[in-house]
């Protein structure tokens, strides 16, 4: 009985917490003419898919760019952070502690300041408004996190495993590629998920480095919608719903990786 | 040092020396070989942008010299300009209020929820997972949703206030409410992080401590203040400090909801820095970079404190 009361309270709390998410979905299905109804409709009574058809007509290129930038960021992040994690965890590099420290501090640097530095550099190099430039910038959010996760995970791998590979005549690189990487699947999944999600969600780099580009990510798609001062809030919210799909999928399909990623930044285990 | 010890270690050295000395050196080569990509990466994509930023803040840049180079060195002029700017003190105050108030509520609510969810009841794991949603959504999604909910005329929040007989509030358009509005949205986004980290901290407290406290007649409230809270202190410190660093950086939410306005009433260092460099027709890259560097110094100071606390908590 007491357990049932607690479940009831928990359901209520969750409902309050998720109300904005519900509201986003509700508004995305509301007709333009009902948008300023007073009081607002709590349910999409005269539901419409106008908003979603606007997404189909206007936002597909933005979604495509975000997807590509996300994949690029994942690839770059993995290539750089997995070997580094292996080295810091198992190869005892002299000065490794200092490097870990630098990586931790790197995570503290506000993105907006990185964006300004990147802007100055990209402008001179003439690579503003390019998807590749965005991938590079977005990866700076994920690389220090990736190294941290890989180091923590690979420290947990038994030394016997690596020694066995060495006895079989595998060099350091072979051991890394054929032994360490395959058993580090969990860490790879966690890092990939977060790298993708961060790149997908990025607004700071997109607005500074890709504000005038022809290939812009979905965050800018939404921002332009709001900025145009158009009153089509169902279209704005429909785009927001679609932009939330990766996060939702992530939570459904990979919940334990998500929780691991959230705590990894704070508490090493 | 005892004789046997020194003999043993000499024997060890003798045995290991021929094999290990070159082995160790090649081991270091391999170790740094694997680190080379990340080192190059850090130099090119962290150190260099930061250096560019520092360089910007120490020169008198115009749009022309920004593109072509050749801006004259101006020492700390940009920093002086920023300090004398009438926006400086309000921006600093807003940054402190935004960060402080957000943290207090995120942490307090997160802690209450963590303690609540730590009791096992049906659906507790599923509902706890659902609490993560706000944290995972792109910030532009949550910020624009809150913007519409806080709309003065058609927002659901004002309609709710009206329903309980209160006057509507101009959340985003009145200078006295804009900062509170972005703080509310930011608290909502930060609760999941605090919940998850504190929950994992709670899981690490052995349950027999609670049983012992219960046997001693401690009630729920007492158990929290006498057992949970003290044992959770290291995790709490880490959560708060990390939250502090994250909150100092917040730019998206404020920029999307209010652009720091109306009339700078919700401007923080992060949005001010962006506004100076990108938000005006005539960009002021030098002062913008100077504000950014002040923000970095703040973030790194607390970052160092965080690392120290974490190290101490681990040992």
Image (cartoon, rainbow, N blue to C red):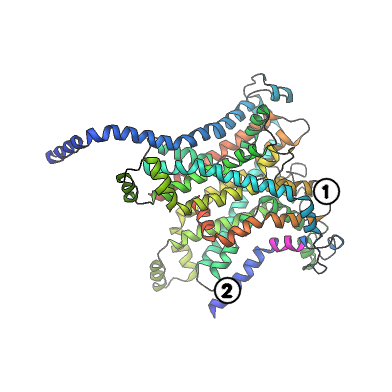
Foreground: B139 or A91? A91
Number of marks in the rendered image: 2
Which residue is situated farthest in the bottom direction here? A1
Pinpoint the chain carrying mark 1.
A
Q: In this view, does A10 lie to the left or right of A233?
A: left
Q: Label 2: how many residues lie within 10 Å, few (<14), some (14-19) or many (20+)?
A: some
Q: Which of marks 1 and 2 is nearer the N terminus?
A: 2
Q: Which mark is residue A229?
A: 1
Foreground: B43 or A130? A130
Foreground: B233 or A233? A233
* Whether labels 1 and 2 share one chain: yes
Which secondary structure class fits the magenta region best?
helix
Which image quarter: residue A170? Answer: top left
Relative height, residue A164 to residue A212 (above, below): below
Foreground: B208 or B280? B280
Identify the residue position indicated by label 2 in the image: A7
Q: What stretch is highlighted in magenta?
A: A21-26
* Residue B279 percent location from the top left of the image: 74, 37
Judge whether residue B95 can be spotted in this image: yes
Q: Is mark 1 on a helix, strand or loop?
A: loop
């Amino acid at each position: 009985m007491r357990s049932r009361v607690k479940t009831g309270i928990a359901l209520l709390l969750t409902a309050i917490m998720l109300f904005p998410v519900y509201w986003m979905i509700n508004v995305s299905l509301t007709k333009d003419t009902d948008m300023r109804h007073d009081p607002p409709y709590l349910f999409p009574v005269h539901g419409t898919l106008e908003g979603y058809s606007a997404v189909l007509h206007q936002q597909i290129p933005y979604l495509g760019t975000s997807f590509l930038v996300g994949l690029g960021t994942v690839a770059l992040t993995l290539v750089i952070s997995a070997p580094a994690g292996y080295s810091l965890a198992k190869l005892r590099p002299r000065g490794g502690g200092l490097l870990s420290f630098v990586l931790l501090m790197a995570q503290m640097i506000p993105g907006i300041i990185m964006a300004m530095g990147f802007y100055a550099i990209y402008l001179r190099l003439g690579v503003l408004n390019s998807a590749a430039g965005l991938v590079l910038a977005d990866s700076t959010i994920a690389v220090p996190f990736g190294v941290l996760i890989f180091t923590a995970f690979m420290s947990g791998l038994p030394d016997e495993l690596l020694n066995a590979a060495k006895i079989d005549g595998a060099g350091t690189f072979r051991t890394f590629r054929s032994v360490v990487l395959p058993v580090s699947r969990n860490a790879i999944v966690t890092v990939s998920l977060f790298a993708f999600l961060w790149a997908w969600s990025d607004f700071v780099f997109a607005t500074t480095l890709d504000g005038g580009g022809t290939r812009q990510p979905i965050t800018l798609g939404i921002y332009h919608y709001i900025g145009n001062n158009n009153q089509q809030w169902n279209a704005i919210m429909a785009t927001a719903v679609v932009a939330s799909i990766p996060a939702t999928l992530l939570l459904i399909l990979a919940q334990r990786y998500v929780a691991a990623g959230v705590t990894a930044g704070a508490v090493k285990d | 040092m005892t004789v046997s010890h020194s003999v043993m270690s000499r024997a060890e050295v003798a045995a290991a020396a021929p094999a290990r000395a070159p082995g160790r050196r090649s081991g270091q080569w391999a170790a740094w070989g694997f680190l080379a990509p990340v080192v190059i990466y850090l130099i090119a994509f962290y150190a260099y942008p930061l250096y560019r930023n520092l360089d910007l803040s120490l020169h008198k840049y115009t749009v022309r010299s920004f593109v072509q180079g050749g801006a004259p060195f101006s020492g700390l002029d940009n920093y002086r300009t920023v300090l004398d700017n009438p926006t400086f003190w309000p921006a600093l105050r807003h940054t402190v209020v935004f960060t402080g108030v957000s943290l207090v509520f995120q942490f307090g609510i997160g802690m209450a929820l963590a303690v609540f969810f730590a009791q096992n009841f049906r659906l507790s794991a599923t509902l706890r997972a659902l609490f993560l949603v706000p944290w995972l959504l792109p910030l532009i999604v949550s910020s624009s949703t809150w913007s519409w909910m806080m709309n003065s005329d058609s927002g659901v929040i004002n309609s709710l206030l009206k329903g309980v007989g209160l006057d509507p509030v101009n959340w985003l358009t009145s200078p006295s409410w804009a900062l509170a509005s972005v703080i509310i949205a930011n608290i909502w986004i930060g609760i999941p992080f605090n919940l998850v980290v504190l929950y994992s901290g709670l899981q690490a407290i052995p349950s027999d401590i609670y049983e012992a406290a219960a046997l001693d007649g401690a009630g729920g409230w007492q158990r929290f203040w006498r057992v949970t809270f003290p044992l959770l202190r290291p995790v709490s410190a880490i959560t708060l400090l990390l939250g502090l660093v994250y909150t100092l950086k917040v730019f998206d939410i404020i920029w999307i909801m209010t652009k720091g306005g109306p009339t700078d009433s919700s401007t923080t260092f992060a949005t001010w820095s962006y506004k100076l460099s990108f938000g005006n027709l005539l960009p002021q890259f030098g002062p913008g970079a100077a504000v950014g560097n002040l923000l970095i110094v703040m973030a790194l100071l607390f970052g160092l404190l965080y690392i120290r606390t974490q190290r101490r908590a681990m040992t």
